[in-house]
Image: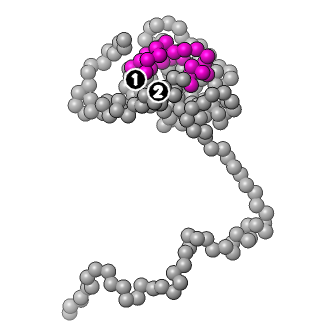
Amino acid sequence: MSQNVRAKKSGLSADIQKKLEAKYSQDQEAQCRAWIEEVLGEKLSNSELGMHNFQQCLRDGQILCKLLNTLNGEPLVKKINQQKMAFKQMENIEQFIKGCKIFGLKDGDIFQTADLYECQNMSQVNVALYAVSAVSIKNGWTGPSIGVKLSQKNERTFTEQQMNDGKTVIGLQYGTNKGASQAGMNIGKTRHIMD
């Protein structure tokens, strides 16, 4: 069971929390679980689907740190705390978040420590796991992955002749009106100016 030490939310905060929980997708969770287990070669501690069950699997941060180190090939998180103390577990999560930034994730893809540790926004945790997978492929990981592959840079070079030929082509954006005009069009009421 989660040891939530925060007071129960009320009013606007409770409404926001309900919306965050409604965004949570068990399909995404199932994909994340299977991917983590395949990459690490070990089963998660709780195999039952559900936001709170998934949170309990990841809450101490150890699995996340191992995952990031495995995907990177060399440790991004040097020391993974094994203690059960809350601040040590939150330290693991913080190390994972710092490692994600070094790994190449954008700030918008990363969650906050409380999102996971206090089960505040588990859908953002899933988003982060999908982003970790996508960036790992970009960084050279050839193992299992989830989500979409990030696009790669595709530079092209053109000869001077090709560049000049392109200047003579009229793009479809310009279109043509084939002699049409707005003469005689009346949209709405006409204005009458009185002296």
Q: Is residue 40 magenta?
A: yes
Q: What is the three-letter code of the residue carrying label 2?
A: Glu
Residue pointed to by mark 1: 51
Residue 169 is at least partly visible in this image: yes
Q: Quadrant of residue 140?
A: top right
Horizontal side of residue 125 vs 185, given as left or right = right
Horizontal side of residue 123 vs 97, given as left or right = left
Q: Which residues are magenta?
A: 35-63
Q: Quadrant of residue 103?
A: top right
Residue 179 percent across, percent down from the top left? 51, 86
Numbered disc 1: secondary structure: helix
Residue pointed to by mark 2: 29
Q: Are marks 2 and 1 in contact (CB under 8 Å)?
A: yes
Residue 129 percent across, percent down from the top left? 52, 29
Residue 125 is at least partly visible in this image: no
Q: What is the three-letter code of the residue carrying label 1?
A: Met
First in sequence, mark 2 or 1: give its number. Answer: 2
- At 43% from the left and 11% from the top, the residue drawn is 86
Residue lying furthest left = 195
Q: Quadrant of the C terminus?
A: bottom left
